[in-house]
Amino acid sequence: MKLPLAYKNKYLPAIVDNSVLIYFRPLFEQVHNECGQASGIGMNFTYEIDFLRNLSANVEENQYPTHYCWNFENGGNGWYGVSYFHSFEILKINGTPNVADYGGMSAGGPERWLSGYQEYFNGMHNRINNYYAIKVGTPDGLLTLKHWLNDHIDGSDHGGLASIYSDSGWDTHLLPEGTPEEGKHVIIEWSSVVGHALTICGFNDSIRYDYNGDGIYTNDVDINEDDLINMKDWEIGGLKFANNYWQGTIYADSGFCYMMYKTLADEFGDGGLWNNEVHVVKPKEEYSPLLTARAV
């Protein structure tokens, strides 16, 4: 996804937090290896389709389960995690029932195969047009993501969410005393292990962390001593994300945490985010199948 030229100098607020909107469902705890579906479907798709339909995500009829898509490809017994890219393809060609029709986020466990024509038919109406990557390792890429979070890059009243692959977010630090959001948790670097999915829900241009220990917070000093000054040197600004792992809301700050902008630019394996990219979905607001088949 690229930022339109008209957005290059468009106003952005210093803080966006979409977790406070009605389209953002309450956090939940993943129960198996379905982190990709927890982020990609349970959080991201739920938010985006509810936004288009102007529905509140705090009821099961407007939430979407993890295990319907996960069970297609988890090995038959839940042993394997499944990339949310694969599940997005299912959302394109098949759709998904809501939580009420499925009976819960993970009803029936990792071996269940949904039965019932009406449930499948209802799910056919909940699809995506497509999904997109945003390369966020440069200021231009970050700007694209921030505009997506702010107004979906289309002038909407509210912006969207994004999913990422990373480690489980276990190595958190605290934002320093006397700085914005002091005492809240922050990721200052990612490990080289990619086995978890998280959901980006906002940004804050003012949070800061003193990487080089010089007592000041800068974005214009070569803190990594590579003779360049770029986003890898930024000590100011970060994204807010939600984590459905580790008992849901017990993680970090009631299930939420920050990650520094710097981690978007650093190389993977050297503190950086996997592939230096995030992923967004664009659902269909309405869809009706033209032809269906039912076995009797």
Image: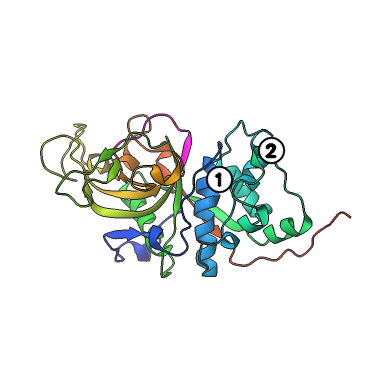
Q: Position of residue 240 (x, y in %)?
A: 34, 50
Furthest-left residue in this view: 215
Q: Is residue 221 found left or right of 255 in the rendered image? A: left
Q: Tag 2: Cα neighbours inside 10 Å, few (<14), some, or many (≥20)?
A: some
Q: Work out whether 169 lies above or below 282.
A: above
Q: State the image quarter where residue 147 is shown.
A: bottom left
Q: Is residue 192 magenta?
A: yes
Secondary structure mostly taken by the magenta-highlighted segment of the chain: loop
Q: Is residue 234 found left or right of 98 in the rendered image? A: left
Q: Position of residue 212 (x, y in %)?
A: 16, 34
Mark 2 to mark 1: distance in Å?
15 Å
Q: Amino acid at mark 1?
A: Gln
- Which of 191 and 110 lies nearest the eye of the viewer? 110
Mark 2 sits on what residue? 111
Please state the total of marks drawn on the protein image: 2
- Residue 242: mark in rendering: none
- Residue 37: mark in rendering: 1
Q: Is residue 33 found left or right of 7 in the rendered image? A: right
Please tell me which residue is depicted at 22% across the width and 40% down the height of the picture: 233
Q: Position of residue 154 (x, y in %)?
A: 44, 67
Q: Which part of the image, by quadrant, shows the C terminus?
A: bottom right
Mark 1, secondary structure of its residue: helix
Please tell me which residue is depicted at 48% across the width and 33% down the height of the picture: 195
Please tell me which residue is depicted at 37% across the width and 34% down the height of the picture: 170
Q: Which residues are magenta?
A: 187-197
Q: Position of residue 94 (x, y in %)?
A: 69, 53
Mark 2, secondary structure of its residue: helix
Q: Work out whether 7 lies above or below 191.
A: below
Q: Is residue 196 magenta?
A: yes
Furthest-right residue in this view: 296
